[in-house]
Image: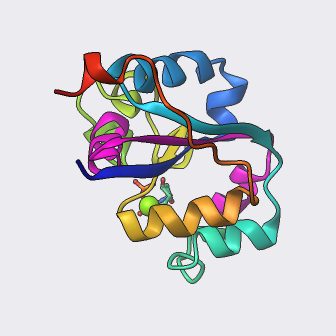
């Protein structure tokens, strides 16, 4: 079975508003495996790399300022189709277009305060995990639930 890892990050508004537990709980109860988690203050350089395709956009300075305004929670979740499913669980980039039941659909209103990030491809997930986590921080472990989650 092809297992994937995705990089999920709770942005400063998600941390400030106390939504960390709810977001972690959704991925946990879905059946995904937590491979890494930590709090961090994002640096300008790290954000420029993370959002490398967006640095020329007019909204980028505000996005960077928002992302540096407080701690973020960095996580790696692992499981079958974790990247695509993680994006579905987050909802659309613009929270007003996100379906109820998704994280953005349930908890936020504006695109500039959309509380979470999720990798959009397996390739980008690997790149982002490498940016936000150091050697040895992402763990490979066996979940005792795996035979109850996967056939
Ligand atoms: P996503 O976070 O859904 O992958 P993205 O990678 O296109 O979306 O953009 C990264 C973040 O940048 C997004 O979560 C919020 C912000 N952003 C995107 N488009 C924007 C816009 N038109 N105006 C303001 N902020 C925007
Ligand atoms: Mg993106």
Q: How many numbered discs, if any?
A: 0
Q: Nearer the viewer, residue 151 or 114?
A: 151
Q: How is the image coloured?
A: rainbow
Rendering coords of residue 20 (x, y %): 61, 23
Residue appearing at x 57%, y 83% in the figure:
56
Image quadrant in which you'd find residue 122: bottom left
Residue appearing at x 74%, y 68% in the figure:
46
Quick check: which quadrant has ligand 2? Answer: bottom left
Query: Taking 99 as reference, is 91 above or below it?
Result: below
Q: Is residue 100 visible?
A: no
For the record, the magenta segment spans 62-90
Q: Where's the C terminus, which quadrant?
A: top left
Residue appearing at x 79%, y 73% in the figure:
45
Residue appearing at x 75%, y 60% in the figure:
135
Rendering coords of residue 61 (x, y %): 68, 68
**In the displayed image of the protein, which residue is found farthest to the bottom?**
56
Q: Is residue 96 visible?
A: yes
Give yes or no for residue 89 being in the magenta stretch: yes
**In the displayed image of the protein, which residue is found farthest to the left?**
151
Q: Nearer the viewer, residue 3 or 6?
A: 3
Rendering coords of residue 68 (x, y %): 78, 52
Answer with left or right where residue 102 lies relative to residue 103: left
Query: Taking 105 as reference, is 18 above or below it?
Result: above
Query: Taking 19 as reference, is 39 above or below it?
Result: below
Rendering coords of residue 127 (x, y %): 55, 70
Image quadrant in which you'd find residue 42: bottom right
Give yes or no for residue 76 being in the magenta stretch: yes
Query: Taking 63 as reference, is 148 above or below it?
Result: above
Q: Nearer the viewer, residue 105 or 48?
A: 48
């Amino acid at each position: 079975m092809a297992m994937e890892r995705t990089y999920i990050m709770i942005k400063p508004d998600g941390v400030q508003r106390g939504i960390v537990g709810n977001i972690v709980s959704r991925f946990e109860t879905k059946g995904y495996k937590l491979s890494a988690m930590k709090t961090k203050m994002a640096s300008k350089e790290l954000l420029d790399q993370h959002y490398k395709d967006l640095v020329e956009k007019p909204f980028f300075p505000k996005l960077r300022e928002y992302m540096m305004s407080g701690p973020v929670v960095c996580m790696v979740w692992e499981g079958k189709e974790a990247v695509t499913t993680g994006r579905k669980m987050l909802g659309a980039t613009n929270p007003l277009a996100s379906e109820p039941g998704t994280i953005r659909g349930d908890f936020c209103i504006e695109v500039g305060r959309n509380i979470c990030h999720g990798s959009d491809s397996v390739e980008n997930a690997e790149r982002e995990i490498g940016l936000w986590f150091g050697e040895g921080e992402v763990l490979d472990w066996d979940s005792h639930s795996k035979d109850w989650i996967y056939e």
